Image (tube, coloured by chain):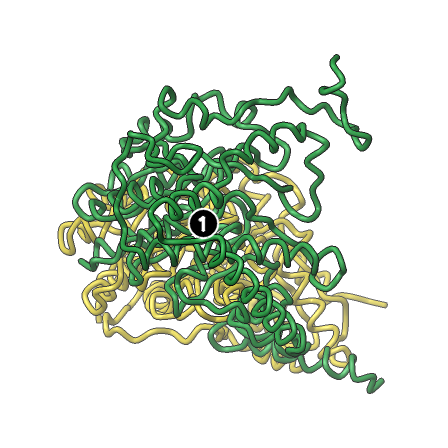
Amino acid sequence: MSSKDTPPATFTGNPRPCVGPVLERARELGIRQVLDADGALAGDLPDPDLPKQTLLKMYRTMLTVSAIDARGWKLQRSGRIDFWIPSRGQEGSHTASTMAMEPSDWIFMASREPGTMLARGATLLQLFAQFFGRAEEPLKGRRLPLLLGDRRLNIVPCMTIVGSYIPHAAGAAWAAKIKGDDTRFIVYFGDGATSRGEFHSAMNFAGIHKPPIVFLCQNNGWAVSTPNDRQTASATFAEKGDAYGVRNLRVDGNDPLAVYSVTRQARDEARELGPTLIETVTYRLGPHTSSDNPDLYRRSEEAEAWRRWDPIPRFRKYLERRGFWTAEEEQQFLAALELQLDEAVHTAEAMRQTAPAEMFDDVFAQPLRSLQEQRAQMLADLAGEA
Amino acid sequence: MAQMTVLEALNAAMAHELQRDPEVVLLGEDVGTEGGIFRTTEGLQLRFGSHRVIDTPLDEKGIAAHAVGMALYGLKPIVEIQFSGFIHDAFEQIMFCASKYRWATGGMYTVPMVVRAPSFGGIRGGFWHSQSPEPYYLHGGGIKVIVPATPRDAYGMMLAAARDPDPVLILEPVPLYRSLRGEVEDNGIAVELGQADIVRAGRDLTLLTWGPLRHDCLGVAQALQQERGWDIEVIDLRSLVPYDEDAILASVRKTGRLVIAHEAPVSGGFGGEIAAMVQQKAFGYLHCPIERVAPPDLPYGYAGADQFYRPNERRIRAGIARTMEFQI
């Protein structure tokens, strides 16, 4: 064993040998790209030639996601929020695919997509109020940090069990088709979710009934500690669509322009051609969650090798090349962003927490008498009337 | 007024809702062309189209999950699970998705869907075709659970389920589907959920039940009036979530004796919950312990065994006698 392969001091597991980024073989593996690793045109998909304003919104959103991630870690590690679900490395995959949808389209979230909320206009304050679980954020402090959503933005929060909600999105899309509406849908999930029965249910039904939906599988390489080759013997996640008659493709998930292009096309064709399964090949640079230690199952060299494909510097180089962005603008943007984050954290943390009576709300449309009795009893007991 | 079987009453109610509300859709295995394996949905696809009465793949989880999505978008799906013994694959979808969306989204999203599950035994169907799965669905909130046992209730409660703003699980009485006929007026009037039906008034003992046992219990009560002079009040609870606490308490305060008969195994069955409620709220009125007549904690028997696994007349009589003759 060479010194390079020596396990870290915290090693207790059996991390598998380092696998290089599959994006290095993108062309050979049929992973569609607009950009190469250095943000130059790769010569595969054409540059969608998006307006400068759209490109800058996409990039600034990605920078904001990255900054939120850094801030969230600090809040979690200092005990101010309970939990954290990192999104570092996956900013491009979800931000670009969200922006490829129209505002009236429905989005079903997973848990690593704060950029989806931001791109639809959610404020930093709304996000941080959710992270702090405060009573007056739209989800009323009932969910772990980052399990986001907002009906006003046509974003459905996920039912937290991985993959359980994929057919909810497909069923909603099917309903829109039955009603004759023009609404399109996108649903986010990860590589691990494709092992769940609901993924297969959704593919099977969608192949038959052709709902207008984009199934967006963000393949970040790892389902907690389980790598792709322990999740499936299929060569790709996309090809699972073949068995169900669902058209599918793989795209470089760290190339926002490629993600935008293929998602936009799938979206635009969804009414006529039905569903598309898109596998965005990306990488989770951080741990699974704040409760995870990736040193147990993967070697740090693997994440280091993927940094060359980090979507943020890659996209920045493209923007700089086109003269849309400068180092100075970046510095100014990040400095202003830190102040906005300070403000959002400060304000959100000061918001009130859920009162005991409030957890009884929203179980049924009209509260059952039994629940009203249980609430009254609990409030009396908590007030110490005995 | 028309005479209908339970099946015909359910069919009439669904047809009424499909006609009245363009958002209503039916989906399930074989519900379209065939009209369901029991023929509950017979003729509905021909009348309302294959986009509203939908034959699905054989996938209970997938059926329930797609219905959740349909309901989120504003349709009113009525799902048929072919037998309640097959519903367990859909449990997560029903109990951890459909019934939790309202709460988990701060009230932003709701899932008003109906799950129909043909249930109950005594049909020589064996374990997987004879189940009473209600206890699993009474725990944790967010879904109503109802059990009609007459043609009139089948009609009125199906209408109520289809118009409810929350998910509703309707356990249909397979043993009564064709065997029971009664007057039903197809008038579009729903039965208010959460109200028990006092099947027979009485002074000496309260016999509480739901589902097909309603009819067994009534027969036993009538016989014991003749034979022993015991005046037994029979209550069909009809709706388990929400349930009619007032009717139970009023009856027990009058009779001082309670026997609960149900088809789900005794431990963790809803009878235990009712007994706990009654001893808390009517402790001073009870003359004797509350008796449960229910199957043992076993899989449903087949062939001859299903005639005594399910509370039969003899077992119900025994439970009543133990209660009436109780001595401290």
Q: Colour of chain B?
A: yellow
Residue at point 56% right, 39% down?
A284
Q: Few, some or many C-alpha atoms within 10 Å of disc 1 (few <14, some 14-19, many ≥20)?
A: many
Q: Colour of chain A?
A: green
Q: Three-letter amino acid code at disc 1? A: Tyr
Residue at point 42% right, 30% down?
A237
Residue A126 in sight here: yes
Image x and y of residue A357, in percent = 65, 79
**Chain identifier of the residue bearing label 1 in the image:** A
Image quadrant assignment for residue B259: bottom right
> Dot 1 corresponds to which residue?
A165
Above or below, B295 relative to A230: below
Image x and y of residue B316, in percent = 61, 57
Q: Quadrant of the C terminus of chain B?
A: bottom right
Residue B174 in sight here: no
Q: Quadrant of the N terminus of chain B?
A: bottom left
Image quadrant assignment for residue B204: bottom right
